[in-house]
Amino acid sequence: MKAYIPIAALALMALGAGTAQASPELAKAKNCTACHAVSTKLVGPAFKDIAAKYAGNKEAEAMLAQKIRKGSTGVWGAIPMPANPQVNEAEATTLAQWVLSQK
């Protein structure tokens, strides 16, 4: 039985390695921080303002993940948010979760 413990641990680590980790580093790596900051409006709204707007909205995570990948227009003003095809679905969901956690 002891021989299976390291194998199981390696399998769990391998599964986790493929998932994106929510962090400011991921936001920076995916160029989110070119237009957004945590606390202040830049070109786009601050992450904390996005979190406040969608607080309590059960559909916010999926909606934001889609907006991250496909872009958006008119929600926060005249400047559109461009599509981000370099962000895969898992990363978009992780980024949406992270944005919604900013308060």
Image (cartoon, grey):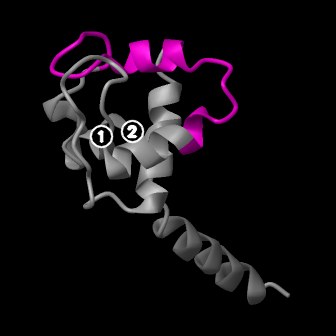
Q: Three-letter amino acid code at disc 2?
A: Ser
Q: Residue sitting at 57 percent across and 72 percent down?
A: 15
Q: From the viewer's perspective, tell me whether residue 47 is left or right of residue 17.
A: left
Q: Three-letter amino acid code at disc 1?
A: Ala
Could one spot residue 21 in this view of the protein? no
- Residue neighbourhood size for the residue with mark 2, other residues' Cα within 10 Å, grouped as few (<14), some (14–19), many (≥20): some
- Judging by the rendered image, the residue that carries numbered circle 2 is 23
Seen in the picture, residue 103 relative to 26 is either above or below; the reply is above
Q: Position of residue 14 (x, y in %)?
A: 53, 75
What type of secondary structure mainly makes up the magenta span?
Answer: loop
Query: Is residue 60 one of those drawn in magenta?
Result: yes
- Judging by the rendered image, the residue that carries numbered circle 1 is 27
Q: Quadrant of residue 76?
A: top left
Task: Identify the element where label 2 is drawn.
Answer: loop
Query: Is residue 75 one of those drawn in magenta?
Result: no
- Distance, label 2 to label 1, CA atoms, is 7 Å
